[in-house]
Image (spheres, rainbow, N blue to C red):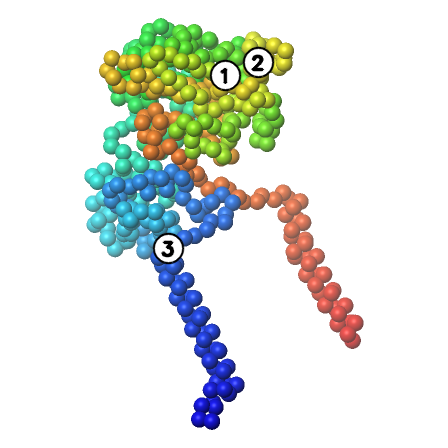
Amino acid sequence: MRFGWLKARQTKFTGYVTLYTLVILAVLAAANYLVTQHDASYDSTKNKLYSLSDQTVKVVKALKEDVAVTYFDRALDFQHARDLLERYTSLSPRFKVAYVDLEKNPQLARSMGVRNLGTLYVQAGAKREEAKSLTEEEITGALIRALKSGDRNACFVAGSGERSIDDPDRNGLSTLKEALDKNNYKARAISLIEKPEVPKDCTVLLVAGPRLDYTDTEVGAIRKYIESGGRALFMLDPPLSVGRQATAENAALVKLLDDWGVTVDKDLVLDVSGAGQLFGLGPETPLIVNYESQPIVREMKGMATVFPVSRSLDTKGTGQASAEKLFATSADSFATANLATGEVRIDPKKDKKGPFTLAVAGTYSGGSSGAKGRFVVVGSSTWASNGVLPARSIGNRDLILNMMNWLSSDEDLISIRPREPEDQSFVMTKNQSNLVFYWSILIMPVAIIMSGFMVWWKRR
């Protein structure tokens, strides 16, 4: 037949191969098209090293104006920066990046004040900020500073035994000061004793664990500040009387908070649920994993926070102020009022049983100016100290920065922030190192040689 060749085995084989080839090419073309149109990736690392944080995603996706990022380096080293910056550009077309070869364009670099390789600037409008290193934390921090107009000042009250922002020891707040600086706050200490008036440029006033009583004049200055629309974070420790570290009751300040609907109890909260043992914590350090729906803690779900040496709080209704709970301990907790001895013991018959509120956020709307004041009260100051804040396994750093952003009316910045990569290196002891050496250099090679010799001998 004229078309008998169509039924030949070779023709059918050729047709099948051609069809399969066309199908494979079509699949590859479709996959290539989808990849070019949709930039997607999956980060399988334990600590999400190649994923941007919630805060970065939130800030970049919300851009309403173009942001120009300029990176200065040698052309051979651009790829390292691209690996990170391209994650930003994939979030918004308004995030634009330019790579400048410092060696080929020295004049441009000089005009922008660039002196070192790896310098990165973020510019929004006329405002330009430098990222001190090529990390997500620094780049996002520079982006936030460039987008926010004006300075945000965090004023720490000093003079009554409060924790110091310049103290690098465990009980100091130097880590908090550094975190505030990276998030566009300028921290400084102020005294209400020398001049009983909160400076007008203070964005947020912070009372961090005073050990001495505030005078009526100081408390009056704080009252005037909040009731005129000011913002404040109060961190008040239990009035323990143990050795030289006795903490005063601060009755005048406690009375002021009571007028605003926050009851500060004279007790010490102890968590006996055992959950804190996972982090090596004792009962005097309550572990929090459940939060309310208030904006400060809305993004904290799934994260743990700790509050060493904390007192309990409560809320009540007032005419001009309103307060709401942020989080509380578990039901397996007690509050003891026996604060005069070095060894604190739980007495189930006398001590109150939980859950206990440890933090409260409130607003004051009865001022003559019409502006609403905001305040946050926490029953501990240790939770923000250098001994606790840097811990990567807990969310204390995110929580206090969320409080600051809510107080300064920057709710759009409330989120989980970028973290420094965790060191995953494995350090071996001397015995482990010797074991690895002998196993890999001696035992395994000798075993392979012997097994080969035995096979040869058997076949012989």
Q: Secondary structure at mark 2?
A: strand
Residues at discs 3 and 1 in contact (Cβ within 8 Å): no
Query: Disc 2 designates what residue?
Result: 352
- Measured in 3D between alpha carbons, the distance from the residue under mark 1 to the one under mark 2, in whole angstroms, is 11 Å
The residue lying at 27 percent from left, 46 percent from top is: 94
Question: Looking at the picture, which amino acid does disc 1 mark?
Answer: Ser
Question: On screen, 346 above or below 434?
Answer: above
C-alpha distance separating marks 3 and 1: 50 Å
Q: What residue does disc 1 label?
A: 312
* Residue 443 % position (x, y): 70, 57
Marks 1 and 2 close (CB-CB < 8 Å): yes
Question: Whole-Å distance between the Cαs marked 3 and 2?
Answer: 57 Å
Residue 230 image position (x, y, % from top left): 30, 18
Q: Secondary structure at mark 1?
A: loop
Residue that appears at 40% across and 18% down = 323
Residue located 59% across and 22% down the image = 332
